[in-house]
Image: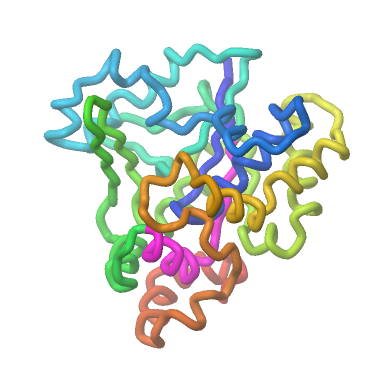
Amino acid sequence: MNKIIWISSFPKSGNTWLRYFLANYFFNKEKIFDQKIIRSIQKFPDDLNIFEKIASAKDINLNPYNISKYWIKSQELMQIKKGNVAFLKNHNALVNINNYEFTNKELSLAAIYIVRDPRDVIVSYAKFKNIKYDMAIDHICAKNLLYFKELKKNKFPKVEIIGSWKFNYTSWRDGIPDIPKFFLKYEDLLKNSYDFFYKLISFLSGILNFSINEEQLKLSIEFSNFDKLKEVEKKIGFYENVSTNPFFRVGKSNNWKKQLTNSQISLIEKECGEEMEFLGYL
């Protein structure tokens, strides 16, 4: 049975914002602001304990790409509560490594992908990671299959096979053509949150067979407002933030124009130009 609706993106593209909106729409029954409402939508793989039961941490530490052996098995073993559908947030590319798929049409009901201008991703990513723009560009334009690995004491290693910005986006755009997909641009959400979130909920209503609750939709937009989340983080922090820098930093588009040099911009546009043009960024 199809179970998973993926919420996917390259890092720092608005995935958490989107996750807040969906968590408020589907799970905020109290109709009050709760910063931790997004716990209703888990992250794959690091919020799940399944990997600890089926995988070898030594195996993955020796070769992070070995995480691919356990992707499908972990999804098959998930115990989904309150129905037979789960939203899962991730930054993985929809990739196949050594004949091990990230996911498949038997386990996936649909996919939602949020994409952001890679020039703005560079700025946000570099500020969050506290690295120079050139290093961020190296990551986002990587020729190899880029991975991130996070090690915490007494925790199973978190590994995400991300790839470049271009690879990550096109992998979800072109992969598993048999499942319905919905693509959102971060910039469109900034311009008109209501219209584009309404389109997203309409997409999901057709898959999950529910009627749109406009009151809940408006409430979800209000509680997911970037400035509100930024203000709350400033007061009490954001429990998912593993950086010393703010997670909710600016929340605007075209910030790259003031931050990047002409040579940096040219490099990004050369590496990602075809996809950027397709998406209307060029």
Residue 158 colored in magenta in the image: no
Closer-to-camera residue (235/259): 235
Q: Assign the C terminus to one quadrant of the image.
A: bottom right
Instruction: Say above or below: 57 vs 227.
Output: above
* Residue drawn at point x = 50 percent, y = 48 percent: 9
| 13 horizontally vs 229: left or right | left
Which is more toward the observer, 142 or 173? 142
How far across and down, in percent of the image, does residue 140 sit? 36, 62
Q: Main secondary structure of the magenta part?
A: helix
Position of residue 250 in the picture relative to residue 127 (left or right): right
Left or right position of 128 against 233: left
Residue 184, given in percent of the width and then of the height, sits at: 64, 53
Answer above or below: position of 56 versus 258: above
Q: Which residues are magenta?
A: 111-128
Is residue 212 something one can see in this rendering?
Answer: yes
Q: What is the total number of numbered labels drawn onto the structure image? A: 0
Which of the 4 image quadrants contains residue 64? Answer: top left
Residue drawn at the location 29% of the way across and 31% of the way down: 68
Give residue 122's quadrant in the image: bottom left
Rendered location of residue 118, percent (x, y):
47, 66
Examine the rendered structure and indicate whether residue 133 appears above or below residue 110.
below
Q: Residue at x 56, y 71 (%)?
A: 277
Residue 276 x, y percent position in the rendering = 52, 68
Q: From this viewpoint, which residue is outermost toward the front? A: 235
Q: Quadrant of residue 166?
A: bottom left
Is residue 170 visible to the viewer in this orientation of the structure? no
Residue 116 located within the stretch drawn in magenta? yes
Left or right of 29? Residue 94 is: left
